Amino acid sequence: MTRGRRRFPLALVVTASLVLTACGSDEPDAGEGEAPHATAEPTSTPIESTAIPRSDLEPVPTTGDRFDITRPTEASPSGSASPDDEAAEPEQVWSYADGDLSAWSEVQAARPEQVRVVDEPARPGSEYSAAFSARPGDFTFGVDTTIRGEVRSTIQEAGVPREGDVQWYSWSTYFPEDFVWDGGDEFLIYTQWHQTANEGSPNVDLWVTAGPDPELRLSVRGGLQGRESAQYAATYDLGPLERGEWLDHVVRIEWSTDPDEGNVQVWIDGERVVNAVGATLFEGQSIYFKQGIYAASNTRREHTVYFSDARWGESRESVALEPAGD
């Protein structure tokens, strides 16, 4: 179903560890999207982009355990699936089928009730979904400029992606009909792939604009990570946000510190809404995966977003979402 988005626009009972702080369809053919982005359909133009000379950046230190990007010996590199393995199972599934949050390594919230498993709304064909809420004062980690209700993976659960790896992710998100982000020019991120330095903005994130007619955005960053900014950064317009229905997301990421080699493609309800070429990885780092609400603290209301199970794999087939049931 065509959803009114602009194609190639121009210009995520608590049983996981809970951190509490006081404070026309473009559905791809079987092989489409697997080819290098340079030979894929036309790439998207960012609505905003920056490229900062390395000499102007103060690099973030990349030493310590969290920068160890060695994979377990039994693990295969991301994106290494052979043609015979195209229909393989996903490498990781973060499921709510057991009615809890135990599939995630960590819950990040100021209050336990911010992140919970519910049976309504649930994606058709699923018994449960996860509800994520955040309101004024939901500060975490001693920071009062942001609010959050999120879950996160470990670096290992996210596959420890490295230079040249390709990963596919899928899930479904539901924004209530009355959802409105009132943060003005500030952000509300609902899914992110975060650099392991834990400083600054994520490598790749999906977010929502403010106002009565919200739109979806994709931000992509990589290269050398500075303390104040990334070497390369770009933002893309994904078109209007459809509220009151489940939005199936499929995301293909090619990880690279090179702005000519990295790539992010996003399909929503089968329609490719962006094909972004740019640096997606920071030098000397990998990523972990997060879903929920991470937002600026200047809101005056509570916000809630719902998510289905999420998964990543080495091919589109491995993360294919079951058709929504009745």
Image (tube, rainbow, N blue to C red):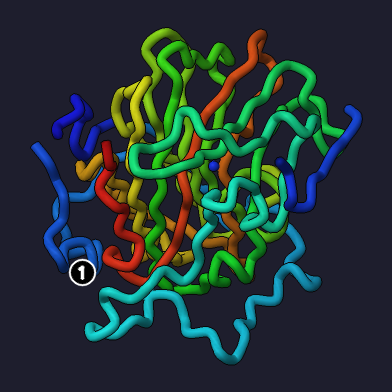
Whether residue 49 is visible, yes or no, is: no
Whether residue 141 is visible, yes or no, is: yes
Instruction: Give the left or right position of residue 273, taking residue 184 as reference.
Output: left
Type of residue at label 1? Ala
Farthest residue, direction left: 24
The mark total stands at 1
Looking at the image, which is closer to me, 147 or 195?
147
Residue 21 is situated, as x and y percent measured from the top left of the image, at: 87, 35
Q: Quadrant of residue 24?
A: top left
Instruction: Give the left or right position of residue 254, taking residue 157 as reference.
Output: left
Instruction: Give the left or right position of residue 297, taking residue 280 as reference.
Output: right
Q: Quadrant of residue 14?
A: top right
Residue for point 35% across, 33% down? 246
Residue 167 is situated, as x and y percent measured from the top left of the image, at: 40, 66
Q: What residue did someone put label 1 on? A: 35
Looking at the image, which is closer to me, 213 or 9?
213
Q: Please say if 323 is above or below 90.
A: above
Please identify the quadrant where the N terminus is shown.
top left
Please identify the quadrant where the C terminus is shown.
top left
Q: Please say if 100 is above or below 240.
A: below
The secondary element bearing badge 1 is classed as loop
Q: Please say if 8 is above or below 78.
A: above
Circle 1 residues within 10 Å: few <14, some 14–19, many ≥20:
few
Residue for point 54% across, 71% down? 159
Residue 317 is situated, as x and y percent measured from the top left of the image, at: 27, 66
Residue for point 47% across, 52% down? 310
Residue for point 64% across, 10% down? 301
Looking at the image, which is closer to me, 193 or 263?
193
Residue 91 is situated, as x and y percent measured from the top left of the image, at: 46, 71
Farthest residue, direction right: 22
